[in-house]
Image: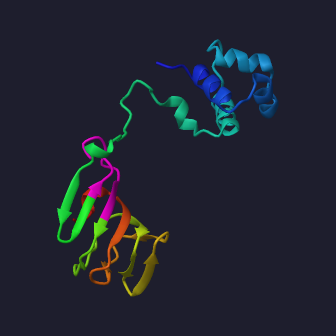
Amino acid sequence: MIEVGEFIRAIRKRRNLTTTQLADQLDLSNGYISLIERNIVSPSLATLKRIAQALSVPLESFFLDPDTEIIYSYLKKDEQQYIPAEGRNWHLLIDHSKTNLMGAFVVDSTAVDKNVYSHQGVELIYVLEGETSLNISKEDYQLKAGDSLYFDASIMHWDNKKPDVPLKLIVIATPPEGFHF
């Protein structure tokens, strides 16, 4: 298990700070920072908070156990799952057996989707290629390559894509189980 002092030292070095520079920022002695980093002394919670702020890390990061499993999803292109669905191909970018915090997809579409959707969570849509029109409640958004739209997915929404116009999107949704294929 990594000690708090070791973590502070690693982040300080990553930030290209010397112990003297960190000590000066915190109005502490260089020797005290050295003692903390060598786990000889334990700083107070107030000092730890100031160190976290100086190093631009969340205070709680000092208390996480690095030996616990890290939630991640790393998928090589040939490991990513494809789901064909009525004129759309969904390319899953996250392995949901590792995490279910969000869904991330690349969507290739040529068909018009006549469904109306409403589900828990939020969505972010980024247009890679083509253009589409997305209606959210009473608003119609014209999206072209490079445009993005973030919205509360519980609000009724639907796609007004023109027929036979190829479209490629990145769609990110939380939570992923509320998403539609």
Q: Is residue 60 left or right of residue 45?
A: left
Choose top left, top right, bottom left or bottom right for residue 30.
top right
Q: Nearer the viewer, residue 129 or 65?
A: 129
Q: Nearer the viewer, residue 57 or 93?
A: 93
Residue 152 at what x, y percent from top left?
Answer: 39, 70
Stretch of the chain drawn in magenta: 91-107
Residue placed at 37% from the left, 66% from the top? 169
Compared with residue 1, is residue 63 higher up or lower down, i.e. above or below? below
List x then y, in percent, for residue 14: 64, 30
Please tell me which residue lies in front, 163 or 143: 163
Asked if residue 97 lies in the magenta stretch, the reply is: yes
Q: Is residue 9 above or below residue 112?
A: above
Residue 49 location, quadrant: top right
Figure coloring: rainbow
Q: Is residue 161 above or below residue 120?
A: below
Q: Residue at x 77, y 16 (%)?
A: 31
Q: Position of residue 151 (x, y in %)?
A: 42, 71
The image quadrant of residue 55 is top right
Q: Position of residue 57 (x, y in %)?
A: 60, 38
Q: Is residue 180 left or right of residue 52?
A: left
In the rendered view, tell whether residue 15 sits above or below residue 165: above
Label total for image: 0
* Quadrant housing the C terminus: bottom left
Q: Residue most toward the bottom?
A: 138
Q: Is residue 112 magenta?
A: no
Q: Is residue 160 left or right of residue 9?
A: left
- The residue at 29%/40% (across/down) is 98
